[in-house]
Image (spheres, rainbow, N blue to C red):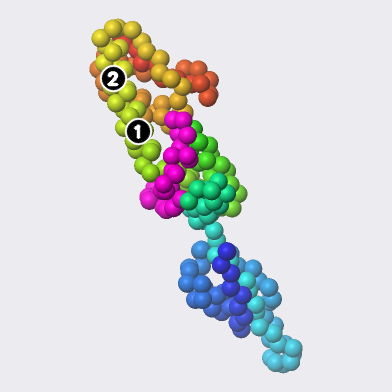
């Protein structure tokens, strides 16, 4: 956590001095006034300057990266964590390392659990409206492509046999990939059924 304590003739003067030292903008910090200025008697006797404590706010992305480093270090896994993109709703973090596969788990279950923990922890230190999305060595992109291929194969089989097929349980994000992959495919429709975490995509012949 980066902090500067500064004095000035006014609170604003002290804040500006702290901002210059920290190299940040006003909206990036929290300001605590430690002492209000006092001109004193006749403008000098008992006069005191303003004193402020300026703390740089921790963003969700910064917190998440530090959190992940601590978790992987505790597991004895050496990983690099970097921000690789962001949108209005999401910040994308990538973990890379020789033992990256340990953080993926069966069909991404470990990665999804880690992502959930990161978001819960980060929401306690920042009210920023975006969510953290984790990936490990490009796993999510490969999984996305694999789900699209699976969806197309299933659709072809449903069209050929005229019988519906029920896929294995998937998290909501992966079900969405299947639905989107088949939404413009002729001869089939999709819907989800069941309760979490066993909710599945059903691919049926269209009427």
| Contact? badges 2 and 1 (CB < 8 Å) | no
Q: Residue at x 38, y 38 (%)?
A: 139
Count of residue discs: 2
**Of residues 34 and 125, the one drawn nearer to the viewer in this rendering:** 125
Q: Picture coordinates of residue 128 (x, y %)?
A: 51, 51
Q: Picture coordinates of residue 46 (x, y %)?
A: 74, 88
Q: Residue at x 45, y 25 (%)?
A: 170
Image quadrant assignment for residue 29:
bottom right
Image quadrant assignment for residue 38:
bottom right
Q: Residue at x 30, y 12 (%)?
A: 158
Q: Which mark is residue 59?
A: none
Q: Earlier in the sequence, mark 2 or mark 1?
A: 1
Q: Residues within 10 Å of mark 2 (few under 14, many from 20)?
A: few
Image quadrant assignment for residue 179:
top left
Residue 25, relative to residue 125: is it above or below? below
Quarter of the image with the N terminus in it? bottom right
Q: Picture coordinates of residue 109 (x, y %)?
A: 49, 32
Residue 47, relative to residue 171: is it above or below? below
Residue annotated with mark 1: 144
The magenta stretch spans which residues?
79-108
Q: Picture coordinates of residue 51 (x, y %)?
A: 65, 77
Q: Secondary structure at mark 2?
A: helix
Residue annotated with mark 2: 153
**Of residues 48 and 184, the one drawn nearer to the viewer in this rendering:** 184
Q: Is residue 96 covered in magenta?
A: yes
Q: Secondary structure at mark 1?
A: helix
Q: Residues within 10 Å of mark 1 (few under 14, many from 20)?
A: some
Left or right: where does residue 203 sit relative to residue 41?
left
Quarter of the image with the C terminus in it? top left
Q: Residue at x 55, y 65 (%)?
A: 56
């Amino acid at each position: 956590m980066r902090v500067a304590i500064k004095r000035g003739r006014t609170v604003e003067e002290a804040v500006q001095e702290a901002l210059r030292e920290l190299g940040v903008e006003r909206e990036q910090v929290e300001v605590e006034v430690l002492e209000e200025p006092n001109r004193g008697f006749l403008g000098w006797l008992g006069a005191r300057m303003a004193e402020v404590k300026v703390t740089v706010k921790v963003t969700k992305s910064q917190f998440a990266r530090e959190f992940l480093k601590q978790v992987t270090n505790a597991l004895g896994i050496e990983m690099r964590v970097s921000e690789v993109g962001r949108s209005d709703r999401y910040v994308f973090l990538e973990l890379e390392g020789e033992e990256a596969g340990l953080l993926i788990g069966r069909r991404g279950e470990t990665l999804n659990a880690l992502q959930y923990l990161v978001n819960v922890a980060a929401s306690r230190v920042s009210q920023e409206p975006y969510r953290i999305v984790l990936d490990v060595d490009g796993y999510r992109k490969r999984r996305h492509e694999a789900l699209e291929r699976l969806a197309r194969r299933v659709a072809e089989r449903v069209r050929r046999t005229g019988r519906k097929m029920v896929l294995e349980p998937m998290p909501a994000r992966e079900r969405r990939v299947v639905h989107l992959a088949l939404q413009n495919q002729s001869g089939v429709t999709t819907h989800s059924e069941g309760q979490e975490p066993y909710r599945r995509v059903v691919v049926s012949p269209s009427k």
